[in-house]
Image (spheres, helix red, strand yellow):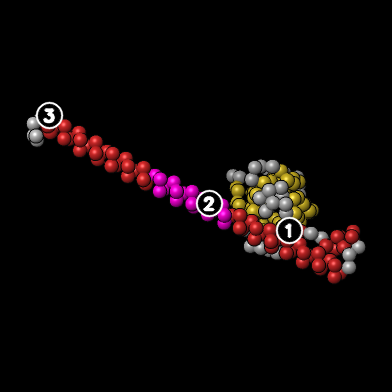
Amino acid sequence: MDFMHYVFVLFMATVLCADAIRFHLSSNQRKCLKEEIHKNVLVTGEYDVQENGQRADLSVTDSRGHILYSKEDATKGRFAFTTEEYDMFEVCFTSKPVSGAVAPDREVYLDVKRGIEAKNYDDIAKAEKLKPLEVELRRLEDLSKSIVDDFAYMRSREEQMRDTNESTHSRVMYFSLFSMLCLLGLATWQVLYLRRYFKAKKLIE
C-alpha cells in the first residue's frame, strides 16, 4: 500500500478554544494536526490510541523540523512544551505495520490545550497553598494577560502590514515615475532620431 499523508489544519480562534478531537488512523497512514502558537505559551496534549496490533508513532515538531516530543509505539500518554517564539507546530500520528498484515482502522483521541487551559490550577493551588478565591483571581489574571498579549500581537501585526503597504505603495509610485521618465526619454529619442533620418534623406528641411 502506498504511504498516504493527510493533514488536518485547525486554527483555534481564542485562548479558551481547546477542543479534543477523534479520528481514525488506517494501516500505514499518517495524519497530522497543525496549529499556530504565540511566543512563550505553554502547550499540553493528551492522546489515546486504540490498539489494533500495529505500531503508532507520535511526533511533535515545529516549522523548522525541531522535534519537541517523540514517542514510538504511542498508545496513551501526555506531552508538554513551551514555545520559544511565534511558530506553527505539528502533531503527527504514523501507523506502521508490524507483521505486514493489514489491520483495521484504529481510533485516535487527541486533546491539545494551550495558554491558561494548559495550566493545572489545582497543582498551583496546592504548591502555593492558595485559597479558592485566590486561585480564581490567578486564573483571571492569566486570562487578562493572555488577552492583552493577543491584542499586542494583533497591533504589531497591523503595524507590520501597514508598513508593508506603505512600502509597497512607495515602490509602486517610484516605479511608475521611473517608467514614465523612461517612456518620455524613449519618445524624445525617437523624435530626434526620426528628425535626423528625414533630414539625411532630405525629406524635410
Q: Main secondary structure of the magenta part?
A: helix
Residue at 75% x, 54% y: name it. Answer: 42
* Of 93 and 131, the residue lying toward us: 131
Residue 71 x/y as whole percent: 76, 46
Residue 198, by quadrant, is top left
N-terminal of the pair, mark 1 or mark 3, is: 1
Q: Is 56 placed above or below 193 here?
A: below
Dot 3 crowding, Cα within 10 Å, few <14, some 14–19, many 20+: few
Which element is circle 1 on? Answer: helix
Q: Nearer the viewer, residue 176 or 2?
A: 176
User: Which residue is rendered at x = 29% and y = 42% of the image?
Assistant: 183
Name the residue beneath numbered marker 1.
115
Q: Over which residues does the magenta segment extend? A: 158-175
| Separation of marks 1 and 3 at Cα, in angstroms | 82 Å
Q: Report the residue at 54% width, 53% height from top.
A: 161
Residue 110, above or below 203: below
Single out the residue that lies furthest toward the bottom.
Answer: 133
Q: Residue 98 vs residue 155: left or right?
A: right
Mark 2 vs mark 3, CA separation in Å: 55 Å
The quarter of the picture where the C terminus appears is: top left
Tell me the tag on residue 163.
Answer: 2
Please give the label number shown on residue 200.
3
Q: Residue at x 59, y 44 (%)?
A: 2
Q: Secondary structure at mark 3?
A: helix
Which of the marked residues, 2 or 1, is nearer the chain's N terminus?
1
Residue 66 horizontal side relative to residue 139, left or right: left
Amino acid tagged 2: Asp
Q: Give the camera-side residue of 113 and 33.
A: 113
Image coordinates for residue 139, horizontal then vertical, percent: 79, 65
Which numbered disc covers residue 93? none
